[in-house]
Structure formats: structure tokens, C-alpha cells
Amino acid sequence: MPEIVSFSPEDFTSFSQYNNTVVIAQAIEDPDVLQQIEDGWNNFIESGQVWALIIGFFLGYLLRTFIS
């Protein structure tokens, strides 16, 4: 006669075969990805972060030329 094993959510031994699984699922609230990219780009430009990026590239290039 087979042994009857009680199930308990706290008992992780019954889930030992699933220890290395990855769940690839999420709930998408706003599926308009291109609009999200456009909004992010507009915020990047309007907030002035693009100038910080350009200045950082320029200063990094100058520093690289002086050090090497």
C-alpha cells in the first residue's frame, strides 16, 4: 500500500524538485512599450540629463588622453 503524504505549504520537502525553477511571468499594466520609451526619452531631454551625459563623455575623453 502506498504511503500517503500530507501536503503542507510550510513543508518545502514536497517542493524539492522545483528548487531550481525560474518563473517568467509578470502582470503588464501598460502594454504600450513604445510610448513608455518615448516618455522616458522626453524626460531625459527635458530634465537636462543629456547635457550631463555629453559633459561626462567629454571630460572622460580628456582624462583618458591625459592619463594614457
Image (tube, rainbow, N blue to C red):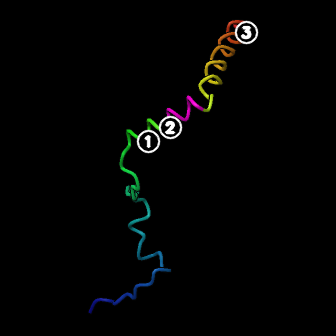
The span from disc 2 to disc 3 (Cα, nearest Å) is: 35 Å
Task: Give the residue type that dot 3 points to.
Answer: Ile
Vertical arrangement, residue 38 with respect to residue 66, above or below: below
Task: Give the residue type that dot 1 points to.
Answer: Gln
Give the residue pinned by disc 3: 67
Kindly identify the residue that appears in the image at 44 percent across and 35 percent down. Answer: 38
Give the residue pinned by disc 1: 36
Task: Give the residue type that dot 2 points to.
Answer: Gly
Work out whether mark 1 precedes mark 3 in sequence or the reverse, and give the earlier one: 1
Work out whether mark 2 precedes mark 3 in sequence or the reverse, and give the earlier one: 2
Q: Main secondary structure of the magenta part?
A: helix
Residues at discs 1 and 2 in contact (Cβ within 8 Å): yes
Question: In the picture provided, is 24 more to the left or to the right than 67?
Answer: left
Q: Where does residue 40 sit, x and y in percent of width and height?
A: 50, 37
Question: In the picture provided, is 34 more to the left or to the right than 60?
Answer: left
| Viewer-nearest residue: 67 or 3 | 67
Residues at discs 1 and 3 in contact (Cβ within 8 Å): no
Q: Nearer the viewer, mark 1 or mark 3?
A: 1
Secondary element type, mark 3 = helix
Q: Where does residue 67 sit, x and y in percent of width and height?
A: 73, 9
Secondary element type, mark 2 = helix
The span from disc 1 to disc 2 (Cα, nearest Å) is: 6 Å
Q: Can you tell which quarter of the image residue 20 is in?
A: bottom left
| Viewer-nearest residue: 17 or 46 | 46
Near mark 2 (Cα within 10 A), the count class, few <14, some 14-19 or many ≥20, is few
Kindly identify the residue that appears in the image at 39 percent across and 65 percent down. Answer: 18
- In the picture as drawn, the residue positioned furthest to the front comes out as 46
Give the residue pinned by disc 2: 40
Near mark 3 (Cα within 10 A), the count class, few <14, some 14-19 or many ≥20, is few
The span from disc 1 to disc 3 (Cα, nearest Å) is: 40 Å
Q: Which residues are magenta?
A: 41-46
